[in-house]
Image: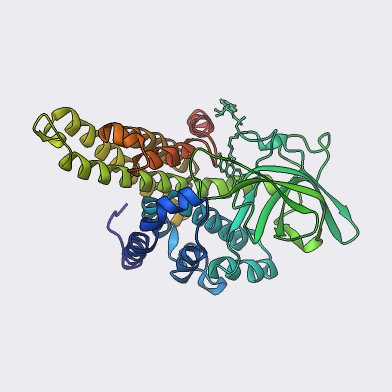
Amino acid sequence: MDLTLNETQSLVQRTARDYAARAIAPRAAEIDRSERIPDEILSGLAELGLLAVNVPEELGGSQAGVVSYALAMQEVARACASTAVTMAVTNMVGEVIAAFGTDEQRRRCCPRLARGEWRAGAFALSEPEAGSDPGGMRTTARRDGDSWVIDGAKQWISSGASAGVFVVWARTGDREAFPGTRGISCFLVEGGTPGLKVGKHEDKMGLRGSNTSSLLFEGCRVPETALLGQLHGGFKIAMMALDGGRIGISAQAIGIARAALAESVQYAKERKQFGEAIAGFQAIQWKLADMRTELEAAHLMCMRAAWLKENKRVFSREASMSKVFASEAAVRICNEAVQIHGGYGYTREFAAERHLRDVRVTMIYEGTSEVQRIVIARSLLAG
Ligand SMILES: Cc1cc2nc3c(=O)[nH]c(=O)nc-3n(C[C@H](O)[C@H](O)[C@H](O)COP(=O)(O)OP(=O)(O)OC[C@H]3O[C@@H](n4cnc5c(N)ncnc54)[C@H](O)[C@@H]3O)c2cc1C
């Protein structure tokens, strides 16, 4: 594997870095406080092609590949983790539709997501009683003439209150004939469809600029053309999307940790105690050295998983390893950043506390650390 970035990858990285530093980072604290990402930030990402990095050009995407996507995600997350998760799910939804949609679905949805015409895409898999185990889902879709009627509830949906299109999973086969995950199908539901209601807004620890809400489906009628992929084939789509999504979350965690490390280095040089900069103390130097080392390892794992996916190799285990390592390392790094900032790190005066709040969820969503370990162990034991 060649780690040198090609021209496209360097360009995407530079473009994302410049935009994130100029237009996003200065507003990150305000985004966290106001619990809202300004529309112009999402429009800016769309203009730069960052809402559909790995979507074919003919569908309005940048077609810049998975490595470019992971690099761009790191840069945006470094500036603002809430903006990054909105970008991550929108990219994931665009990719899923590009990969599994009919021509009509792809042409209707992908360009709108890429252009930012729809404020975001949303991925509606989790339910109140079905998180790590999507096979426990209760939402149903039943055929009625030339429509599907969806009933049930989804939980924890990122951009649930603002998305223009939702990829929704529902049970289409009864449990006896289709046990576990076998009778699940996938649907495209546009925002504003009658019968789709946005439910409770979650008051979260971090990622406060990204809205997370429940969704209620009450006799939500969609045309038969809303089925995405094969009937009863939805679980496979979810797993394939999550495998790719985990590379994005790994990159998000790395981006947040990069910000925490850079701010820690700066603070350690400026803060004086016992008559000298705290950067002069070996205890602080060792923390910084460990933070940098873990970050480097996380980055290499992320690049490897991205490279495998980009080159159409099997990448599921590497994506899980990358996510579990990067997210747990990033939580440790952000925690150390607070420690290096001392009491100031525990206040809103410095971004360190926001990074720690924001990064924690990377160990939970798109499969918890425990679920990643299950995926990794299963592949080891199967071999
Ligand atoms: C901010 C945020 C945004 C999210 N965005 C989305 C979204 O856009 N779309 C979406 O569909 N979902 C989303 N989620 C949901 C997220 O993916 C789930 O929270 C996650 O999959 C875990 O499910 P759960 O919360 O029900 O926990 P549970 O599955 O109830 O797990 C509880 C604990 O038990 C552990 N556990 C469960 N099963 C096992 C097992 N077999 N072995 C060992 N340990 C186990 C888990 O690891 C965890 O520690 C989001 C969540 C959050 C917090």
Residue 351 visible in this rendered orientation of the protein: yes
Residue 123, placed above or below residue 98: above
What residue is rendered at 49% in x and 29% in y? 377
Depth check: give the residue in front, 264 or 232: 264
Q: Determine if residue 233 is in view.
A: no
Report the front residue among 102 and 218.
218
Residue 202 found in image quarter? top right
Query: Residue drawn 77% across and 34% down?
Result: 179
Is 215 placed left or right of 75 in the picture?
right
Q: How many marks?
A: 0
Indicate left or right for 294 with 367 as reference: left
What residue is drawn where x is 45% and y is 36%?
Answer: 360
Residue plotted at (73% across, 38% down): 137
Q: 78 or 41, which lies in front? A: 41
263 with respect to 247 (left or right): left
Using residue 94 as the reference point, say whether residue 143 is left or right of it: right
**Residue 79 position within the rendered picture, expressed as x and y whole percent measured from the top left:** 37, 53
Kindly give the residue lying farthest to the bottom in the view shown: 58
Spot occupied by residue 22 in the image (x, y as percentages of width and height)? 34, 63
Q: Nearer the viewer, residue 172 or 114?
A: 114
Splitting the image into 4 quarters, where does residue 191 fall?
Answer: bottom right
- Which residue is situated farthest in the left direction here? 275
Coloration mode? rainbow
In this view, 289 is above or below 226 = above
Image coordinates for residue 135, horizontal then vertical, percent: 70, 36
Q: Position of residue 50 (x, y in %)?
A: 46, 64
Ligand 1 visible in quadrant:
top right
